Image (cartoon, grey):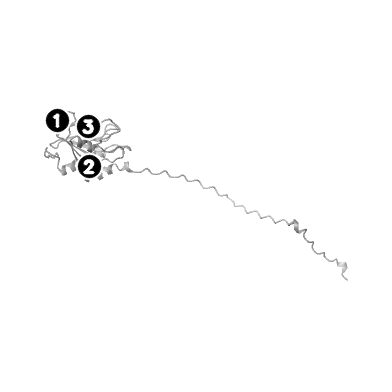
Amino acid sequence: MNTHYPTEGPPPPEERRRRLRETLELARRSPPSPTAFAVGAVIVAADGTRMATGYSRETHPTDHAEEAALAKLAADDPRLVGAVLYSSLEPCGQRASRPTTCAELIIAAGIPTVVYAWREPPLFVTAAGDHRLRAAGVTVLEEPALAAEAREINRALFRKPEPEPESEAEPEPKPEFETEPEPEPEPEPDAASGPAPAPPARPDAQDHP
């Protein structure tokens, strides 16, 4: 069901939140990646008609959600000049995977309003999309109430790698039988003290009367 709102000015808050929830559902479709966000995007015409949707890595490993949605529309589609682009993440203003950023694609398409839920954290590049869009005259609205949900979809990117377990040395095997300790040798007589005295002579029986 389409929701109509005035063509002049940004969409009302309830419409913004409803559309952003759609982007969150799209973000969950994104194939997982350890080096990129999972994002969803929806482009809505001024009369409330949903024009196109997209999500990260939808058709290619380096696809961004906004890029995937815009690719489904003709560049000269007259509805673009009154459309609103919703994204679960701030559109990128810097990019490593391709030469054209999502902010530049949005500006080139003539879309006048962008609404996003979560400001891009500096995990991979410095966030600059919001600033670049505003500098080009685009109306940018942030809905931080849904930022936590957008971040939760990407929680795996914030997990620290677990340290590898230390190898434990195997204990040395105990002998099957314990040997008795050898007796200590008796001390040798001291040569300086001379020979040991001879035992007294036993009296002979014939000496007695």
The three-letter code of the residue at mark 2 reads: Ala
Where disc 1 sits, the SS reads: helix
Q: Which mark is residue 23?
A: none
Residue 68 in view (yes/no): no
CB-based contact (under 8 Å), mark 2 and mark 3: no
Q: Mark 2 points at which residue?
A: 117
The crowding category of the residue bearing disc 3, from other C-alpha atoms within 10 Å (few below 14, some 14 to 19, many at least 20), is some
The image position of residue 2, as x and y in percent, is 14, 39
Q: Which residue is drawn at 17% across and 42% down?
A: 16
Q: Residue furthest bottom?
A: 209
In the image: residue 181, left or right of residue 106? right
The three-letter code of the residue at mark 3 reads: Leu
Q: Which of 74 and 172 is in front in this view?
A: 74
| Image quadrant where one finds the C terminus | bottom right
CB-based contact (under 8 Å), mark 2 and mark 1: no
The image position of residue 65, as x and y in percent, is 24, 35
The image position of residue 126, as x and y in percent, is 28, 38
The answer to which of marks 2 and 1 sits earlier in the sequence is: 1
The answer to which of marks 3 and 1 sits earlier in the sequence is: 1
Q: Which residue is drawn at 28% across and 42% down?
A: 153
Inter-mark Cα distance, 3 to 1 = 16 Å
Q: Which of 168 and 148 is in front in this view?
A: 148
Residue 147 in view (yes/no): yes
The image position of residue 29, as x and y in percent, is 26, 38
Relative to residue 21, is residue 70 depicted above or below?
Answer: above
The three-letter code of the residue at mark 1 reads: Pro
The crowding category of the residue bearing disc 1, from other C-alpha atoms within 10 Å (few below 14, some 14 to 19, many at least 20), is few
Where disc 3 sits, the SS reads: helix
Inter-mark Cα distance, 2 to 3 = 19 Å
